[in-house]
Every structure is written in structure tokens, then in C-alpha cells.
Image (tube, helix red, strand yellow):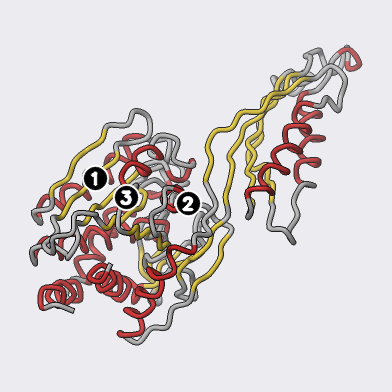
Amino acid sequence: MSDRGADAVRWLEAREAAMLALLAVLVNIDPNSYEEAGADAVGARIGGFLAEHGVSVATIPIAGYGDALKAHVAGRGGANRPVVLMGHRDTVFPTGEAARRPFRVSNGRAYGPGVADMKAWLVMNAFRLAAFQRVGGAPSPLVGLFTSDEETASPACRPIIEETTSGARAVLNSEPGRPSGDVVTGRKGGVFMASTVHGKAVHSGADPAGGTSAIGELAHKTIALHAITDLERGTTVNVGLVSGGQSVNTVAPLATCEIDLRYVRPEDREAAMARIAAIVTEAMLPGTSAALTIRGEFLPLQDAASRALFEAYAGASVRYGATVSGAFTGGCADSGFTASVGCPTLRAVGPVGGRAHSPEEYREMESLVPRARALAVTIMGA
């Protein structure tokens, strides 16, 4: 590693308290995917930090989801293909969750909404960009891409992600590291869908036989949809949200649901989608009708081209006493988009954490600086 690279690593090693302070600020902001103000508030904090350290930041306006931020650190080795540090600012928690469960530290772990997925990444990559800016850049240019809608399958940011990473030297996606410390070398694909069911409303006491319940139809469909799940093949279908009805004494004229499909192989997607479409369109209760809409989609990640990138990261980790393996996960991420455009991609290289999307979500305190350091060394060789 060059003297400048060593200087960047040493600067990071001395910034644990500052990283923790910024993480606390970000965890105590609510950036729900559908709350533009919260996502932009987190973006403003990140943008302000980068600007203070001389890192140039461009804002890409996105209505409804929060703007995307693209930071840039010039390369100094003559290479013009960038290394992209990528991740998202949005979380799955409702507005008000940060006030109910503010940032706290207990027994070596940090807690709070989004502390692992993925506000610790925001901190880690912001500090990495600042470190390389201080020493005059990495061998290749660095781009920090901070998106705002990953938890909803990136309907607005996907084109920005694909444009930014197409032709890049490498993508380092800092979703949280597995509880074991492993990084992710394969992910499932996923499809987020919505279905609306129409029935016929009547008075449920005076004329119960004259109507048809959309809720009843949706109940039948939910059971059939869940039966598509095939754990052996890695295919799962989950109806995660339902709503409907007009009043307690009315046969429900309308019901809606949101459906999550996960799959491993492209052919499994096609087979599952055909079954989902058939279940949605077939009326199990006469007089009902339904439609299916795809809201967002993630691509699977199984690219062999990223093997060298993983080995470089694993080698950097071993250098500092940590053994890292590759793991497969059923979770989806933007890394599938970057691999699909042919860019070597390594994911889950963020700080170690677990129980994402739950009130017990945590981040291992001691992992923040070591993971930042290992990735900085990887960047030097990418």
C-alpha cells in the first residue's frame, strides 16, 4: 500500500468517535422510503459532512422519494474508470420511529431504526470519501452514490444506479455485513407487486346473499399465493400488506394486498409469476375481479466476475486479523442492478449488524472502523 493509502487508513482509524457521533445524528432522523423530507434531511447531513471535507457533491432531484446524491473524489493514478461506493438512505420504519426508539448503545452494540440497514454505511462511506480526499485521491476516481428508494426496489433511482455503474471499475455496496462478519456474494431476485380485488357491496345483515366479499376473495387468493413457496428451490411468496372493506356491516366491495416474490434463478421467476398472475385473475368467488401491478423489481446477483473483488477484500481483512467468507442471502439489493450491467460488485461490506427491519436491529460497535479500513485497502487495489 502506498504512503497516501496508509495515511488514509490511519486517518480513518482515528475517527471512531466522530463516526459514532454522525451515526447517532442520522439514526435519529426518519427517512422512510415514502417520506421525501426525511430522506432529504439525511442527505443534507451527509452532503454537509462531505462538503466540509472538500468532497464535491451533486444533487439529482427526484420527486417523491428524496433526491439522490453523487459525490466525487478525483483519482491520482491516471485511471479514469471509477470505483463506486453505493448504498441507500431510506428505511422501512414509519415516521416517528426514531423518536420512539432513538439511537442508543448497550453492551457493545448500537441500536435504533436503520442503524445497520443502512445508516452505518452512510457514515462509513462518507468518512472513506473524506479520507481519500484528504490524501489527494485513490488510484482510481471514487464516486459515492447515495440513493433514496432502495427499500421499494429503487423505482426512481434504478436508472441513476445503472448509468453510474455501467463501465465502472468496481462497485462496493455497503449493505450491512452478516452477523458472522461475512460479505454477500449472491442474492435472490425479487418482485414487489400489488393487487386490487373488486367485489359487490350490500348490507351484511339485511342482504348477505346479495353481495360478494372482496376480502373473502383476497383471503382465498392469499392462501393460494403462499402455496407457491418452494423452500427447496429458494422461491418464496409473501402477502405482506392487506387492506379493504367499507364498514363492519357492509360486504366488502374492495380489498388490496401487496405481494413479495423472491427467487434464485430467472426461470423460477417466470414460473412463479405465471402462477401468481393466474391466481390473481381467476375468480374464486363468483362476481369478483382482480388486477395485478408490478411496483418494483430487483435482479438476482450471481456474477462470477466479482470473485477477484471478493478475494481482494478478504485479503485486506486478513491483513488486519479478520477472516471473511462469502454468503448467499434471500434479501434483495441494488447490487443486482450493478452486476446486470457487467460491473464487478461486492456487497454487504458495511459494518456488521443484524435483525434489520425489526425493533431489535443492531450494529456491532467494534466493526465500524475495521470494515472502513478493510474497504479502504480494497479501494487502493481495485
* Label located before the other in sequence (1 or 2): 1
Crowding at label 3, few (<14), some or many (≥20) Cα neighbours within 10 Å?
some
Q: Mark 1 and 2 residues: CB-CB less than 8 Å, in contact?
A: no
Q: Position of residue 363 (x, y in %)?
A: 40, 67
- Identified by mark 1, the residue type is Lys
Q: Earlier in the sequence, mark 1 or mark 3?
A: 1
Q: Nearer the viewer, residue 307 or 371?
A: 307
In-image side of 15 versus 328 (left or right): left
Q: How many marks?
A: 3
**Who is closer to the viewer here, 338 or 209?**
338
**Amino acid type, mark 2:** Gly
Under circle 3, the secondary element is: loop
Residue under the image location 75 percent in, 30 percent down: 280
SS for tag 1? strand
Determine contact: label 1, label 3, CB under 8 Å.
no
Q: Which residue, given by chain and number where applicable, does mark 1 sit on?
A: 70
Which residue is under mark 2?
336
Quadrant housing the N terminus: bottom left
